[in-house]
Image: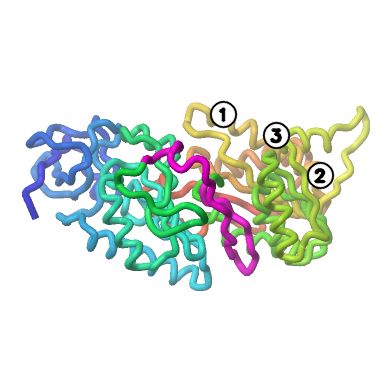
């Protein structure tokens, strides 16, 4: 291996990195021993010249170094193949029957800035760091060798790319997907490339149910794979129940509940496209007769359903209510507003829940910890004069591993509460 430029850390800044966190901020760096191009590999040492890792450097980002290994490594196709195979082994151990799952979860799999999702025989790649972006060809080659996929797509439409000095990038990196084929290095990239041709949806199997999924324009890389285990877990409360699925998206929770024996499931989502897809998914799985759908602002719907005249009471209608909203906050400054939003939907939902019924609720914001989230729910229960029994605690599916030393890897939390009275 060629000699690497050294990034020397200030005194007291090495402990977090030694413990396993991969991000080094520009404020933690004492100096560089030589000029270095953005995206290149560097070695990191503490102020006493002790090696603590190697990683990608980027002066344009607040995260100046993304550590890949505590040792000196050569980052090539072989490196990516070994890391991806190690990550795949984790998925095969904890989700042995899954055919669609997250293969690489960035920091969780010690590949900061890289996400790879597997949807049956198609892979979707998201790259959010310059060092990874410069090695895209090596990553694609390793993925081809391991999975032999029909196609590898890129969804580089995240806002986080701009913080690394990267433009948005979308397209087919390998193979064919619908009318799209892999573009040569000289082909146009970004949202204007191949704009007139839209890729078709793919049918994804989750827990034995089929979901039509848009890998080009859908949320994240197509759908929420991090709830795969929770879809099945929450459905245990659905037998013989009237179910309300709020923020239903493609129908993950609602269709699992219908299959588990719900009397009826009503699904709500603000997106008309999502509701249309969920309706088709219900029909595909033979569950259409058990389901109804409404494209509506969920806050407005809950408010309307719980609006009563003075001295009147809300008549509870549901035995199971599922709340799986998008993140209400992207930063710490907006947490107070987010907590008010979470409390509002829980207040309304609890008023619609019958005694003995179950509330399954989730929060996907990293900035709202599990204790704070539960406190919001209990505050709503107090205001509505309900006593709750906690019967389950949820986290993200195991293909989104949690590394406790990297708090950013733990973001999804949830509970199931029964209404005692």
Residue ID for mark 1:
336
With 17 as the anchor, is 312 left or right in this view?
A: right
Residue 404 visible within the image = no
Residue at horizontal 49%, vertical 38%?
Answer: 367
Residue at horizontal 52%, vertical 46%?
Answer: 197
Does residue 194 belong to the magenta stretch? yes
Q: Nearer the viewer, residue 166 or 315?
A: 166
- Predominant secondary structure in magenta? loop
Screen quadrant of the N terminus: bottom left
Q: Nearer the viewer, residue 245 or 278?
A: 278
Q: Quadrant of residue 253?
A: bottom right
Closer to the N terminus: mark 2 or mark 3?
3
Does residue 63 belong to the magenta stretch? no
Closer to the N terminus: mark 3 or mark 1?
1
Q: Are marks 3 and 1 in contact (CB under 8 Å)?
A: no
Residue ID for mark 2:
352
Q: Secondary structure at mark 3?
A: helix
Q: Which residues are magenta?
A: 188-216
Q: Nearer the viewer, residue 420 or 86?
A: 86
Q: Are marks 1 and 2 in contact (CB under 8 Å)?
A: no
Horizontal and vertical percent position of residue 151? 43, 59
Horizontal and vertical percent position of residue 381? 72, 41
Question: How far separated are the C-alphas under marks 2 and 3?
Answer: 13 Å
Horizontal and vertical percent position of residue 229? 57, 62
Residue 64 visible within the image = yes
Question: How far separated are the C-alphas under marks 1 and 2?
Answer: 25 Å
Residue at horizontal 33%, vertical 57%?
Answer: 140
Which mark, by number, is residue 344? 3
């Amino acid at each position: 291996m060629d000699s690497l430029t050294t990034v020397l850390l200030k005194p007291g800044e090495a402990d977090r990195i030694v413990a396993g966190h991969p991000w080094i901020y520009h404020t933690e760096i004492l100096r560089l021993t030589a000029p270095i191009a953005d995206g290149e590999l560097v070695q990191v040492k503490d102020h006493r010249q002790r090696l603590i890792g190697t990683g990608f450097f980027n002066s344009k980002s607040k995260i100046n170094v993304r550590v890949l290994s505590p040792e000196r490594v050569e980052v090539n196709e072989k490196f990516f193949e070994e890391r991806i195979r190690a990550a795949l082994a984790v998925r095969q151990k904890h989700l042995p029957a899954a055919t669609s799952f997250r293969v690489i979860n960035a920091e969780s799999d010690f590949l900061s800035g890289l996400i790879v999702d597997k949807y049956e025989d198609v892979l979707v790649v998201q790259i959010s760091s310059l060092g990874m972006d410069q090695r895209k060809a090596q990553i694609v080659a390793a993925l081809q060798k391991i999975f032999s996929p029909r196609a590898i797509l890129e969804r580089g439409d995240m806002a986080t790319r701009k913080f690394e000095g990267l433009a948005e990038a979308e397209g087919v990196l390998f193979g064919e997907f619908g009318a799209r084929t892999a573009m040569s290095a000289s082909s146009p990239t970004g949202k204007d490339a191949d704009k007139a041709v839209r890729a078709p949806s793919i049918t994804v199997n989750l827990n034995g149910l089929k979901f039509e999924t848009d890998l080009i324009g859908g949320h994240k890389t197509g759908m929420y794979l991090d709830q795969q285990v929770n879809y099945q877990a929450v459905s245990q409360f659905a037998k013989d129940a009237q179910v309300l699925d709020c923020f239903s998206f493609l129908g993950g929770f609602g269709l699992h509940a219908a299959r588990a024996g719900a009397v009826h499931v009503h699904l709500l989502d603000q997106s008309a496209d999502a509701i249309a897809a969920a309706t088709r998914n219900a029909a595909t799985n033979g569950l259409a007769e058990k389901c109804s759908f409404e494209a509506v602002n969920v806050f407005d719907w809950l408010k309307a359903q719980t609006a009563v005249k003075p001295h009147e009471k809300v008549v509870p209608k549901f035995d199971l209510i599922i709340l799986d909203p998008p993140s209400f906050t992207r930063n710490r400054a907006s947490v107070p507003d987010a907590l008010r939003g979470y409390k509002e939907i829980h207040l309304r939902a609890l008023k619609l829940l019958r005694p003995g019924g179950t509330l399954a609720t989730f929060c996907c914001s990293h900035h709202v910890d599990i204790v704070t989230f539960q406190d919001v729910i209990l505050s709503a229960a107090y205001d509505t004069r309900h006593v709750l029994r906690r019967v389950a605690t949820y986290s993200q599916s195991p293909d989104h591993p949690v590394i406790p030393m990297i708090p950013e890897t733990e973001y999804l939390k949830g509970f199931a509460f029964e209404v005692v009275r």
